[in-house]
Image (tube, helix red, strand yellow):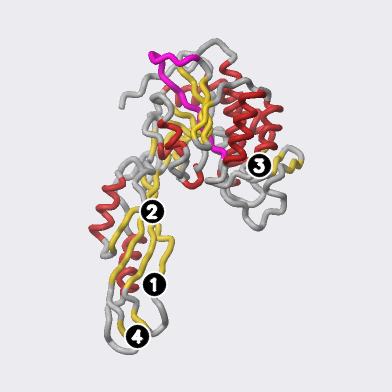
Amino acid sequence: MTHTNAIELLKQLVAIPSISREEGAKADFLQKYMQETLSMHVQRVGNNLYSHAFDFDVAKPTILLNSHIDTVKAHANWTYNPFAATQVDQCIYGLGSNDAHASVVSLLAAFDTLRSMPQQSYNLILGISCEEEVSGKNGVEWLLTQLPAIDLAIVGEPTGLEMAIAEKGLMVVDCVAHGKAGHAARNEGDNALYKAVKDIAWCMDYAFPKVSEQLGPVKLTVTMIEAGSQHNVIPDTCKFTADVRLTECYTHQEILDIMQANMQAELTPRSMRLRASGIAKEHPVVQQHLSMKRGVFGSATMSDQALMPFPSVKVGPGDSARSHTANEYIMESEIQQAIAYYVELLNGLQIPKYNK
């Protein structure tokens, strides 16, 4: 599969809408393409696809190449058709072109190249997943239940082919401050909004003491608030939402305990699934990447790495700043470079088995 084939495939993928949880048509098309055009044996679970490059050898470690086919919804201010790949010089405009169809086709092309080369010292699986943009339970989390134990994942996301060796996790916390209703004209009631304001002020000012070398501090941000029924009634409840970006320094429960110890509101986390991730700089895949004169960083944005309980890195073509924006695009040269990068990174790579 050449880079020209990969670029043409990307254009075909862009033309098939695949908003999160609505990826069926794109999964159908890609499954058929992999089976009929590339002669791959493809297995499917929901709208997730996977394929083995070589006969599986239980004695070898296993590498998973992963990216996702779902997209966010298109903004109203697109000037190009988000579902028609529009090429202007080197740039291909279209929803999902950068995030993450460029990674999908680049990983697929590299996988196709590697399976035609002498067998490697590892098992290699390509896993193309759905529901990444919403961290859905029917995405990579379901896919992993169908796969053997994974010792390393390479997650394709737009990083400019720099390697994220750490990534923040996420916990969304719903907070409810309780008070007592009363008439606003009289000195009565207990204003839940004022209680919430004190809690929000704490969220603004508090600095978690443990700071990650790669990811920096935990980031706690109040992003939504709702209170009151009318202007002359003291609100008896105030609801607000906190977005917490975790590092490997804290578990979800430790963060929640610190918040609850300092806040009056009732706190309910929506999920404790989305973990911070990281890999040692000494890991062979990181060392191989560094030997290719490319940099590493800690990522504030989240990917399906959050659902992978084994070593993983995030690296792919494109630029994260283009993701989720109107007139998202990818450059042809970025795809060509990514295919060559993935093949060089993986060919001859030797990794250890992951000991949990």
Numbered badge on residue 16? 3
Left or right of residue 292: residue 151: left
| Secondary structure at numbered mark 4 | loop
Count of numbered tags: 4
Numbered badge on residue 172? 2
Q: Earlier in the sequence, mark 3 or mark 1?
A: 3
Q: Position of residue 337 (x, y in %)?
A: 63, 28
Q: Is residue 295 visible?
A: no
Give the image quarter of residue 111. top right
Within 10 angstroms of label 3, few (less than 14), some, or many (20 or more) residues?
A: some
Q: Is residue 315 magenta?
A: no
Q: Looking at this view, is 131 or 6 the one in front?
A: 131
Disc 4 marks a residue whose amino acid type is Ala
- Read off the residue under disc 4: 184
Q: Is residue 229 visible?
A: yes
Within 10 angstroms of label 4, few (less than 14), some, or many (20 or more) residues?
A: some
The answer to the question of whether label 1 and label 4 lie on touching residues, with beta carbons closer than 8 A, is no
Left or right of residue 280: residue 89: right
Tag nearer the camera, 3 or 1: 3
Q: Position of residue 150 (x, y in %)?
A: 41, 26
The answer to the question of whether label 3 and label 4 lie on touching residues, with beta carbons closer than 8 A, is no
Q: Which residues are magenta?
A: 55-69
- Read off the residue under disc 1: 227
Q: Looking at this view, is 350 or 32 the one in front?
A: 32
Q: Residue at x 76, y 42 (%)?
A: 88
The answer to the question of whether label 2 and label 1 lie on touching residues, with beta carbons closer than 8 A, is no
- The residue sitting at the bottom extreme is 185
Q: Earlier in the sequence, mark 1 or mark 4?
A: 4
Q: Earlier in the sequence, mark 3 or mark 2?
A: 3
Disc 3 to disc 2, C-alpha distance: 31 Å
Q: Is residue 57 magenta?
A: yes
